[in-house]
Amino acid sequence: MIEISNLGFSYGPKPVLKNISLKASEGNIYGLLGENGVGKTTLLTLLCGLKKPQEGSITVDGHNPFNREPSLLSEQFYLPDEVAPVHASARNFAKEHGVFWPKFSLDKFVAVLSELEVSADQKMDAMSAGQLKKTWIAFALACNAKYYYMDEPTNGLDIPSKAQFRKAVTKYTAEDSTLIISTHQVRDLENIIDPIIILDNQEVLVSATMEEISAKLFFDYGTELKPGALYLEQTPGGCIQVYPNSTGEESKVNVEAFFNTVHAHKDVIKTMFNL
Amino acid sequence: MNQTFSSQRFWTYFKYDLTQMWRRHSLAAILIGGASAIFYILWVMFSLVFSQQWTTPPIEARFVVFIIAFTILELYQVRTYGYITDKKEGSSWLMIPASRTEKFVSMLIVSLIVVPFLFIAVYALLDGFLSLVDPTYGKALVAGFSDVYAKFLEGLAEINSESVINLNPSSVFIPSVIGFFSNFMYFLLCGICFKRNKLVGAIAVLFGISTVLSLLMGFIMPGVFENWDPNISEETVQMWVRNTMNITTAITCLVAIGLGWGIWHRIKTIQH
C-alpha cells in the first residue's frame, strides 16, 4: 500500500507539488496524467526514493522510500523516461543486474524481450533508443517487483511496440503488483490503466477508477449534439460529448476526453469527485 | 532482512561493482597501469629513430613516470564513481537493492584498495618483466623503491643520531599512508559531488583550501616565533617535534575521517 500524505516539493522557490494526499492500493495499474511540468516525474521519483519529500510524507508498506532500504528497493522498480545505455549485451546486463531482485527471472527477461522483438545478445550501447527502452522494460518486468513506477514508458516506442508493451504489462505483472504509469499519450495506455490520477498545478485534480468516472460522467459517441455537455470534440464521422451522468447509464470512458473535460471544468469535476 | 549490512548482499554487490568498474574503466586502467611499458617502447623507438641506438630509460626517468602515472591514477578517482551524478546512470545505481553502507564500503574498497594495488601490481609486473627480458633496462623499479626506502631509514637514523630530534619511521610513514588514502578519497568525493567539470572543480577547491590555509598560517606563525628562545632546551625541542608529529597525524586522520564522512553523506543524500 502506498500512502502519500500532504506531500510538498519545490525546485527552488517554485512549488511543483503542494499538499498532495493519495492512497494507492495493490493490484492496480494507475495512470498518472497531467500536462508537461505539473510534477508527474517528480512524484514518481519521490515515490521510488530518488528524491526526499520537503513536506509531508510517503510510505510504501510502512517504509519511507527515501531511506532506500534494500528490502523495499528489491520490491520496486523505477523505469525513467530516459534510460541509460550499458556497455554489455542485454543478456549479460540482465544476469549481472538481476541478482539484486530476489524474484528476478532471466527466462522471463528473454521471453519479454523476444515479444518486444529485441535480441538478448545485442549490445545495449549499440541499440536504438526504442530498443534500449524495450530492454529496460523487459528487465523491469522480469524483476517481478511489487511496485512499478514507470515514467512515460511508451515514449520512443514505435506503434507495434506500444501494443506489445500493453500486452507485456498485462501478461507479465503479478496480480498483486501496483503500477503507477505516467504518460501524456493516454491513447497508448487507455485500455490498461485504471484508476486514473490527474495532476495539475501542484495538486491532484482527480483520482478515480474507471467505474467511478463512468458513474459520474457519460461519454456520448453519437452524432447528435446535446446541450449541457461539459466537453465536446468533433471526430471523423461523429463527436465525443461528455456530460454529467444523470441517468446512471454506463458508457465507455474515453481517457483523453475525460482529461480534457477535467481541464476545462476543474472546479465542477473536483466537486463531482469530492476532492 | 538486515537493512544496514548483510555480508551476502555486500559480496553480491561488491562483485557487481568490480564488474562495472572493469567495464567502464578497463581502457584507462590498461593505459595507466601499462605506463612503464608505453614509456619504454616510446623511449626505445625515439632513440632508434634519432640516434640509431638501442637505449632504455634510466631508472630516474622511470621513477618520474611512475609518480606521474600514480598522480594520474589519483586524479582519475573523480571519474571512477563520477557516473552517480548522472541522472540516468545515477538513478539506476541508487535503485540497486543494496544498502547505503554496502555501497559506501564497496566504493572505498574499490577506490582505496583494489584500484591502487592493482595499478601497483600491474605496473611492477610489467616493469619487472621488462627488466627480465632486456638486460639494458636495469633493475626493476621495485628494487629501486627498496633502495629508496633503505636510504630513507638510513637518513632517519642519521638525523636521530646527530640531533636532539628523535623520529621513528612509523611517525613519518603512518601520516604518509593516511595522506595517500585521503588524496584518493578527496578526488573520489569531488567526483561524486560535482556534476560537471569534476577535475577542474576538484583542483579549484584544493587551490582554494590551500590559499585559505596559507593565509591562516601567515597570521599564526609570526606569533609562534615571536617569543622564540634560541637557547631552547633539548627536551623542549623533542617535545615540540613529538607534538608536531602527533598533531600532523591527528590532522591527517581527521581529514581522512572527514572525507570518508563526506562520501557517506553524499551517498546518503544524493537525489535525482
Image (cartoon, rainbow, N blue to C red):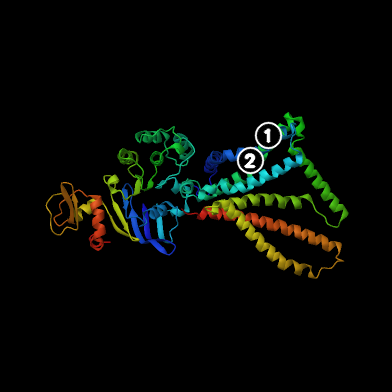
Quarter the C terminus of chain A occupies: bottom left
Residue at (58% x, 38% y) in the render: B27
Q: Chain of mark 1?
A: B
Question: Residue at position x 74%, y 66% from top?
Answer: B221
Q: Residue furthest left?
A: A224
Contact between labelled residues 2 and 1, with CB atoms less than 8 Å apart:
no
Q: Residues within 10 Å of mark 2 (few under 14, many from 20)?
A: many
* Callouts 1 and 2 on one subunit: yes
Q: Is residue A233 visible?
A: yes
Depth check: give the residue in front, A29 or A112: A112
- Badge count: 2
* Left or right position of A139 against A269: right
Q: Is residue A219 visible?
A: no
Q: Position of residue A64 (x, y in %)?
A: 44, 55
Instruction: Tell me the subunit letter for badge 2.
Output: B
The label nearer to you, 1 versus 2, is: 1
Q: Which mark is residue B32?
A: 2
Provide the secondary structure element on which disc 1 rests: helix
Q: Looking at the picture, which amino acid does disc 1 mark? A: Ile
Residue ID for mark 1: B41
Q: What element does badge 2 sit on? A: helix
